[in-house]
Amino acid sequence: PSIHPSHLFPFPFRRPPFDSMDAAVERLKTGFEKFKTEVYDKKPDFFEPLKAGQAPKYMVFACADSRVCPSVTLGLEPGEAFTIRNIANMVPSYCKNKYAGVGSAIEYAVCALKVEVIVVIGHSRCGGIKALLSLKDGADDSFHFVEDWVRIGFPAKKKVQTECASMPFDDQCTVLEKEAVNVSLQNLLTYPFVKEGVSNGTLKLVGGHYDF
Amino acid sequence: NLTSDFSCATKASEDHSGLTRQLLDFQHDTVDETDGGYDPFSQLKERFTDFKQRNYVENFTNYQKLAEQQTPEFMVVACADSRVCPTSILGLQPGDAFTVRNVANLVPPYEHGASETTAALEFAVNSLQVPNVLVVGHSRCGGIQALMSMKSKKDDRSSRTFIRDWVSLGKSARLSTEAAAGNLSFESQCRHCEKESINSSLLNLLTYPWIEERVKEGNLNLHGGYYNFIDCTFEKWTLVYRPGLEGGSKYAIKNRSTWS
């Protein structure tokens, strides 16, 4: 099976000349040292209470895409947001067997940390959303796990294909990026502890889309 | 010698100061707790506008290039804990690292089947062809504490079954912790387990055929990292995999160091 399904890349994919391993790791060291001297050491009153525990107000779902870290785009400081990042920032509906990873994160955030707001953030040029839109009904998975995962957004795909049939593919992707966020927000309500929090007014659900 | 070899600084943005300047200068918002009409958007809006003016606009050309394609150097698996965003602590720039965050930075073994982490590994390694995977653990991890606290199922009347099911993926780390450090305090055992779990995740990475193949070929390196926010240190190491050798000597650690 092809490891480069063409729908994921518009042009022939060429592996760029990456840094040597040592140089790449060395850059992380520089980054860490800068964080330590310019942020951590300069704000002891801020970091001291965080040693004992975290009390974030937000839970954030963002995409794993290297271009969209929510700490950067939303200026989130250490301690503010319990953050899950996965392909296409998806929240599957409640399923004990298949999605314990996401389930445990939501459970921990809502029940133990008592976050006040859950934010689901999609973004432009999302490869996962593009893969979802490109799925052929009934075709074999050439990208098995990725396609299995992005199928979570299938209701959104159906909606976009119906309502935006005449749009060019890229515009459909943009709509799907947002509609998939809505599917995730709906899926959040299938978790009993989320539903309860929303009904009580102790929990708010927010959707977002970052266009870079 | 980083200063004499400038080519290694040119990959993404070599200037880390934008992100750290942002973190440094940012005025800590206080939310008016008595305001019943609290709008969750307003605080985020200010932050985003700040990001756009001070980061996006300044680095517009970079962002335009990134919009065409991402070619990250790393895939990072980090914890969802609000205190340990790898972008912040490692000064990662947009485009540097495809980043998965889950509870206790766990990588399930291949046999576990479909999961969000498995999909991300498939995409990052097969499609993006990242040359490095870095699993980052941290101090005072609630997920690892839950793993170490787990009682047998019949004794555990907690309704939090999701957390239990997920952190159980780290049970081999718990077992080796109890063997190596069972006589130490619970907190020390948790510290030990946080690091054991990183190694267990690294070994789990090798259970994925497409990962094992690339590691054998020398096209993919697997690294562990441990962020200790009590004393602000970062320990890192690289996994060595020698499939030709038998038993335990197949695996070794190299390049271990602590940044402080």
Image: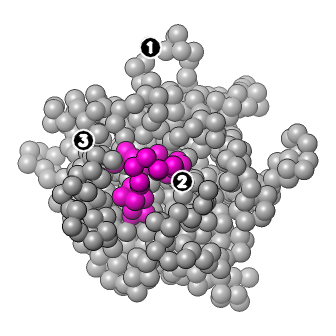
The front one of B159 and B217 is B217
Residue that carries the numbered disc 1 in the rendered image = B157
Residue that carries the numbered disc 2 in the rendered image = A143
Residue A188 in the image: x percent, y percent? 29, 39
Q: Secondary structure at mark 3?
A: helix
The residue positioned 13% from the left and 50% from the top of the image is: B38
The residue positioned 78% from the left and 62% from the top of the image is: B217
The residue positioned 60% from the left and 69% from the top of the image is: B73
Q: Is residue A88 above or below residue A170?
A: above
Residue A159 in the image: x percent, y percent? 23, 52
Quadrant showing the C terminus of chain A: bottom left
Residue that carries the numbered disc 3 in the rendered image = A186
Q: Earlier in the sequence, mark 3 or mark 2?
A: 2
**Bounds of the magenta segment:** A126-153
Q: Is residue A176 magenta?
A: no
Main secondary structure found in the magenta portion: helix
Q: Residues within 10 Å of mark 2 (few under 14, many from 20)?
A: some
Q: The residue marked by circle 2 belongs to what chain?
A: A
Instruction: From the viewer's perspective, tell me whether residue B142 is left or right of residue B49.
Output: right
Q: The residue marked by circle 3 belongs to what chain?
A: A
